Amino acid sequence: MIIQIGIVAGDIWHYLDINGTEKLSRLILATGKSRDLVLMSLGWLAREGHVVLKGEGDYEISLRQKEAV
């Protein structure tokens, strides 16, 4: 299961990199994965500091912007 979560996390990262900010419901449809698997993968990405989640329920998700040096 951990491998599946990692793969979906990569899919989400690539999707957001190409498409920008997205709602959770749309991200679930775009990945074609279960809500649970998408949420676990987002948790992984959030814990690693790669994504920002805003709102409640149908979260708005975006990649964390790198700070300028």
Image (cartoon, rainbow, N blue to C red):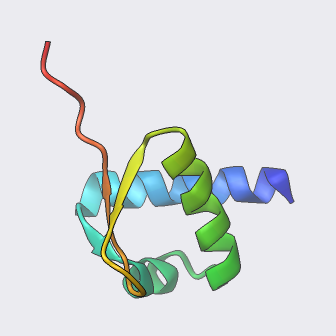
State the residue in front, 2 or 11.
Answer: 2
The quarter holding residue 50 reads top left
Residue 20 located left or right of residue 44:
left
Image: 48 above or below 61: above
Q: Which residue, as the protein is rendered here, is positioned at the far front? A: 56
State the residue in front, 30 or 5.
Answer: 5
Which residue does the image show at 60% across and 71% down from the upper left? 38
Q: Position of residue 68 (x, y in %)?
A: 13, 21
Which residue does the image show at 39% across and 61% down from the upper left? 15
Q: Position of residue 59 (x, y in %)?
A: 37, 77
Quadrant the N terminus occupies: bottom right
The number of numbered discs placed on residues in the rendered structure image is 0
Which residue does the image show at 66% across and 65% down from the upper left? 40
Residue 39 located left or right of residue 30:
right
Quadrant the C terminus occupies: top left
Q: Which residue, as the protein is rendered here, is positioned at the far left? A: 68
Image: 3 above or below 61: above
Q: Which residue, as the protein is rendered here, is positioned at the far right? A: 1
Image: 65 above or below 24: above
Q: Position of residue 41 (x, y in %)?
A: 62, 60
Residue 19 located left or right of residue 52:
left
Q: Position of residue 12 (x, y in %)?
A: 48, 60
Residue 69 located left or right of residue 65:
left
Image: 29 above or below 22: below
